Structures are given as C-alpha cells and as structure tokens.
Image (tube, grey):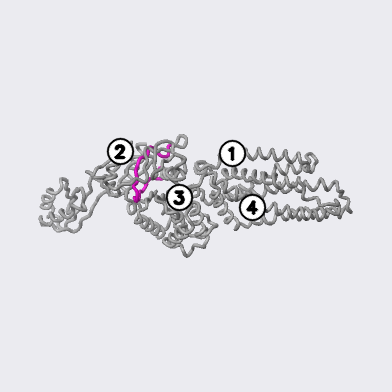
C-alpha cells in the first residue's frame, strides 16, 4: 500500500519525501521560488474523496506534469488551484496568495491562465473577439491587449484567421485559440488540462512545440496529461496522481527509481560469444552486478550515460568487440503503470 | 461589485446574440406587431359594429390591452436569458469565464443586463407605437387622447421591468437544470402564465387592471416574488454549483 507520495528529487543531492518538502534553505540554494505549494490538499464530494491529501511544490519557471488515469483527481486539483471549487481540507498557496481566502481568490485568478479540458470558446464570436473579451475581463490595457492578441495569434498561426468565427475552426485551431486566450493577460502561471487530447498528431505537435516556447519564456506551467511521451519531453518534474499523489520527481529520477538497485542497466551486445568470459572479469571491477547471456551482457550502473564510456573501454581492453550498447532502464510508462497499480491496490 | 465587469460580459452577450435571428426577430417584430394588431382589431370592431363600441367600453379595453405588454415582457426575456446562460453551458464556455477575476455576482449581473435591457427597450418602443396608434384610432370616439396616462406609466415603468426581471431570474434558475437552449426556452416561457392569468382576469372583470390600487398591489407582489427569485438564482449561480452540480 502506498500511503504517501514518494518524491525522487535532488536538491543539493538530497532525496526528500513529499511529507517533508524541500526546506526553504534547500529551495533557496537551488534558486527555488515556489509558485504552487500544496499541503494535504483534499477535496471530497459527499462521501467520495476526489483528491486525497496531496502535497507538492512547483517552482517558478518550472513545467510540472500531472499524470494520472481518468478520475484520478487531476481536473479537480486544477479547479481547486484555480479557485473554481473549494478545497475540503489542507492548504495551498499560489504565488503569495492563500487558497481558500475569499479576498485572495480574485488575485489568484488574475495571476493564472487556464486551458480547460473543454476549450469552451464563444463559437459565434471571431478569434479576435474571443481574446479581446477575456483581455478586458483581466483588465489588460487596450494597447497591451491588442499587442498580446496579435503576438499570440501570430505565434499560433491564427493571425490570418482572426476575423473568422471560432465555430468554424478545426479542433486543433480551437485548442490553439484556447491557449492564446489563457495567455492574453500574460499570466505567470498557466494551467493546461490535457491540451493535446483528441488532437491529430500534427496539431498535437504544434501545441507541444508552443508549450516548449512558453517554457523558454520561463513561464510556470502546470500540465495535466495522459500522454506519457508528452510529459517526458516537456516536463521538468512529474507528479503521478491516483486520488493520492503517488510520486513526484523528474522523468529521469522516476525511471531510475523503478530500475533494480535504484539505477539502470546497460546492455552490451558483443560480436563473439567467446569473448564474454574475459570481458566479464574486466567489467566486475566496474560494477558489482554483471550478468551474461550468450553474447549479451547486462551491467547494472548508477548512471549509464556517464559510465558507459568506462564499460566500453573495459570491454575493449579485454579483447571484446562491441556490436551495440543500449541503456535498458525502466521507461516512464513502466513507472507510471507500476505506481498507479500500486496506488489502486493500496487504496 | 464592479459594474464595469458586468458590462463587459453583457456587451459580449449583445455581440453574440445579435447574430441569432430568432432573438432579433422576436425583439424587433413582436412588440410592434402587437401594437399594430391590437389597434387593427379595435379599429375593425368599431367599424363592423357601426361604431357601437362605447367610450365606456373603450376605457376598460385600453388599459387591459396595455397590460398585454407585461405578458410580452415575461415572454421576450426568455429566449435571451436562456441563451445567455444555457448557451454558455452548451458551448462549455462557463469554466474559462469562471476562471477570470470576476465574482459570481458580476457574471450574474452581466447576464441579467444582457437579458433585461434589449427586451425592455423593444417593449417601450412597441408600446409607444401602440399608444400613438390607439390615440389616433380612438380620439374620435373618446374625444381626447387616452394615452399617455398615469396607470400606463405605472405599467410601463414599474410593472413591465419587474415582470422582465422575474422572467430573467426564473430563466437563470431553469438554466441550471436544463442542457439545451430549446428546453430552457420552453420552460422559461412558463413565466408568462401569472401575467396571462391576470390579463384573463382583467378581461373577465374579476380584476380591474385600470385601477391604480390594483396595479400597485401587483407591483408590490412582484417585488416580493422578484426578491425571492433573486435569492434562489444567486444561490444557484455559484461557481462550485455550476461546475459540479449543473447538468
């Protein structure tokens, strides 16, 4: 049973559990400015617990991915953090404001942008008018609003279609327009709820590329997604949610943590099977765990990317001829499935 | 509460539904058509009966016809009120709207403004035409211009806005329970029933709708009903309710 989230993080090379988030000193030394901070955040609908004691931190400029199966509580968490629904218990801070304080709710909403799972555009209005309306609601001054509308519509390839009613747009175009809408007031923090769901591969790529552009601008992005590949490519850190937060960490940390012995494996395929005996002896000096199967050697390493060079050198010295070297660690998919199953069996 | 936010929302709604032909036709045609039709009927009946519609009968008929605009008020607010809220539900645009730095009251007021003022101006326009046509038709019989009079002013400036407000509030409440605009409009249309009932009572001489005291009583009752519906609609139109309980 997983009773609390495992956090695979290194700040000053220290791992911490989510029950004890990085201390102010740790965050400070790593240049952390917390944008989202939750502590035991819980939401119940009657007898149903949708989000259970979730604790995590998201730093400024970080892209944080929230992974989880349907009904895991991802959208509910986003809605709580956007002050759309109330929390049942726990604490959360967005920037300098407290979630749950009515006087902070408007300030939080002004600070954030939301791309909901349903784009929810005004289909009878043009692309420009959709953005203009939201810009006005966010008190964006006229000149800045016009400039931002042009900038974001141009970045997303919609400027030429600015006067076309949104109802005639394709799904991909609508999604892009919804992203532009969330950005029109230049929020510091952007919540995106499955922004590439139901999009064709080309549209999904455009949206992903745009998120990467936003990442370069150092915007903080909270990304709800089902797409593991997307999370791996875009996110600095990932949280895996199944009502409870099961684990958080960088994609690499999560993969490494699942691999046996806390590291990953390098698989070396040699040209001649006969060479494995001599090579094995050479490799044992590098790693305590080396196994051979035919002409295939598996070497347990802490960090294969750094240590593979030494492995190759040792094999060459022992007279081995290498056909290929692959890093065979657990994939994010393996991590996700394992943790979610553990979480489900534990709940 | 910042009125500017409500106006932004109302302006957006004006822009959205001015492209909806059924709403525009309802606003532009019905109040004026009613003015022309009622005047036509009075004129026709007068001629057919060789002028046997007495001035005393006319004085009873005219305020009752004026009350017809109160029924129209309850009816005309329905398509717009249900469109502004159920339309947002259908387009799923309420969530991003609720995520903006606006309060529930500001959004509700914006929706209210969008549904309240266009029918109000259309009805005032229609009733002005009605009064002019009626005066032209009945002056020879009455010997004076019947309109405008204080009772009509009471109907147009108190009763009619209160009836409109009631219809808007009823539609807000109904909107939380329906998933398509047509159903919302059909159910919202029920708001005309109490006013249609009063009109029938007026025609059957059960209630004298030309009596100022009676009109003031109706106004007082409507204020109470509107307050009640306001409390209910305010409780219905809350972020959490909308996102988690609205169908």
Mark 3 Cα shell of 10 Å, populated few (<14), some (14-19), many (≥20): many
**In the rendered structure, the residue with mark 3 lies on which chain?**
A
Residue B71 appears left or right of A232: right
Residue B174 appears left or right of B60: left
Q: CA distance from mark 3 to mark 2?
A: 31 Å
Tag in front: 1 or 3: 1
Residue B57 disc label: none
Residue A14: quadrant of the picture: top left
Q: Which residues are magenta?
A: A49-72
Figure check: A115 above or below B229: below
Residue A62's x, y, as percent? Answer: 34, 50
Which residue reaches farthest bottom?
Answer: A160
Residue A156's x, y, as percent? Answer: 42, 60
Residue B232 disc label: 1
- Sequence order check: which comes first, mark 4 or mark 1? 4
What residue does disc 4 label?
B118
Determine contact: label 2, label 4, CB under 8 Å. no
Callouts 4 and 1 on one subunit? yes
Residue A122's x, y, as percent? Answer: 52, 55
Figure check: B31 above or below A341: below
Q: Residue at x 43, y 59 (%)?
A: A152
Q: CA distance from mark 1 to mark 2?
A: 45 Å
């Amino acid at each position: 049973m997983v009773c609390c989230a495992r956090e695979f993080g290194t700040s000053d090379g220290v791992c911490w559990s989510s029950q004890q988030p990085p201390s102010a000193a740790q965050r400070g030394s790593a240049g952390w400015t917390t944008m989202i901070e939750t502590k035991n955040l819980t939401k119940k609908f009657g007898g149903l617990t949708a989000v259970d004691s979730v604790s995590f931190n998201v730093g400024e400029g970080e892209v944080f991915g929230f992974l989880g199966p349907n009904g895991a509580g991802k959208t509910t968490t986003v809605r709580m953090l956007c002050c759309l629904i109330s929390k049942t218990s726990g604490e959360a801070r967005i920037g300098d404001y407290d979630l749950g304080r009515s006087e902070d709710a408007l300030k939080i909403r002004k600070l954030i942008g939301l791309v909901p799972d349903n784009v929810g555009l005004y289909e009878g209005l043009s692309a420009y008018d959709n953005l203009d309306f939201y810009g006005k609601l966010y008190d964006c001054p006229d000149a800045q609003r016009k400039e931002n509308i042009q900038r974001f519509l141009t970045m997303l390839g919609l400027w030429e279609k600015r006067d076309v009613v949104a109802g005639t747009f394709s799904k991909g175009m609508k999604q892009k327009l919804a992203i532009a809408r969330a950005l029109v007031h230049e929020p510091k923090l952007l919540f995106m709820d499955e922004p590439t769901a139901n999009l064709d591969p080309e549209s999904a790529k455009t949206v992903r590329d745009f998120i990467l552009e936003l990442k370069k601008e150092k915007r903080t992005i909270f990304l709800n997604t089902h797409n593991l590949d997307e999370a791996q490519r875009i996110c600095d850190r990932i949280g895996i949610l199944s009502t409870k937060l099961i684990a958080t960490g960088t994609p690499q940390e999560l993969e490494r943590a699942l691999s046996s012995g806390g590291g990953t494996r390098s698989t070396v395929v040699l040209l001649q099977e006969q060479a494995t005996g001599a090579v094995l002896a050479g490799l044992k000096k590098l790693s305590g765990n080396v196994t051979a199967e035919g002409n295939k050697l598996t070497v347990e390493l802490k960090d294969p990317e750094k240590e593979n060079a030494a492995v190759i050198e040792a094999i060459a010295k022992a007279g081995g001829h290498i056909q290929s070297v692959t890093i065979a660690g657990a994939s994010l998919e393996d991590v996700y499935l394992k943790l979610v199953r553990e979480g489900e069996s534990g709940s | 509460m910042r009125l500017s936010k409500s106006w932004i929302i109302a302006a957006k709604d004006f822009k959205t539904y001015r492209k909806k032909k059924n709403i525009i036709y309802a606003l532009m045609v019905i109040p004026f058509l009613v003015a022309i039709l009622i005047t036509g009927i009075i004129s026709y009946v007068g001629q057919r009966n060789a002028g046997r519609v007495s001035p005393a009968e006319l004085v009873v008929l005219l305020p009752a016809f004026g009350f017809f605009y109160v029924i129209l008020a309850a009816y005309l607010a329905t398509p717009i009120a249900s469109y502004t809220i159920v339309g947002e539900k259908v387009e799923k645009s309420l969530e991003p709207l609720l995520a903006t730095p606006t309060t529930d009251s500001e959004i509700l007021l914006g929706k209210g403004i969008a549904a309240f003022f266009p029918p109000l101006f259309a009805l005032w326009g229609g009733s002005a035409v009605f009064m002019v046509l009626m005066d032209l038709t009945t002056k020879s019989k009455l010997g004076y211009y019947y309109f405008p009079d204080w009772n009509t002013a009471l109907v147009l400036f108190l009763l009619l806005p209160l009836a409109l407000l009631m219809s808007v509030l009823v539609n807000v409440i109904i909107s939380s329970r329906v998933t398509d605009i047509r159903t919302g409009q059909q159910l919202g249309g029920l708001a005309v029933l109490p006013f249609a009932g009063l009109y029938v009572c007026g025609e059957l001489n059960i209630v004298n709708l030309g009596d100022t005291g009676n009109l003031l009583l109706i106004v007082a009752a409507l204020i109470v009903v509107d307050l009640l519906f306001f409390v209910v609609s305010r409780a219905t139109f809350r972020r959490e309710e909308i996102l988690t309980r609205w169908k």
